[in-house]
Image: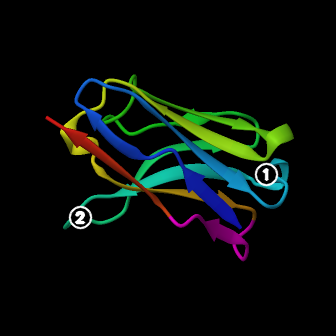
Amino acid sequence: QLQASGGGLVQAGGSLRLSCTASGKISNASTMGWYRQSPGKQRELVAIISRGGSTTYPDSVRGRFTIARDNAKNTMYLQMNSLKPEDTGVYYCRALYSLDIDYWGQGTQVTVSS
């Protein structure tokens, strides 16, 4: 089970840090990630991190967002800087252990005002 937190309302140019805490060991997760869903749009990838620490970002957030995982705390983070109104949405965390074991958090709302 995953619990996402840290969302809120922030002005454009501001920062937020999201956290995703797992009830189980995330060290066994092959990939963890953050996704977001904006009103009227499909859920999209924001950042992923592999078990080995490799990270991937889409062009829309690269250089502004940083994903990290702390296996000792069973927690994943998303540091979001230089936020833009288009970053507004519900942010979901995900932990992929295998094709059959795929967990999603409940989502946390991020609203960026212009």
Nearest the viewer among 57 and 103 is 103
Q: Nearer the viewer, residue 74 or 35?
A: 74
Left or right of 83 on screen, residue 47 = right
Q: Amino acid at mark 2?
A: Lys
Q: Is residue 53 above or below residue 5?
A: above
**Residue 101 is one of the magenta-drawn residues:** yes
| 10 Å crowding of disc 1: few (<14), some (14-19), many (20+) | many
Where's residue 73, x and y in %?
Answer: 81, 41
Locate the N terminus and report the quarter of the image it occupies. Answer: bottom right
Residue picked out by circle 1 = 26
- Callout 1: SS: helix
Task: Tell me the amino acid under the disc marked 1.
Answer: Ile
Q: Residue placed at 70% from the left, 33% from the top? A: 53
| Residue 1 within the segment the image draws in magenta | no
Visible residue check, residue 50: no
Q: Which residue is mark 2?
A: 41
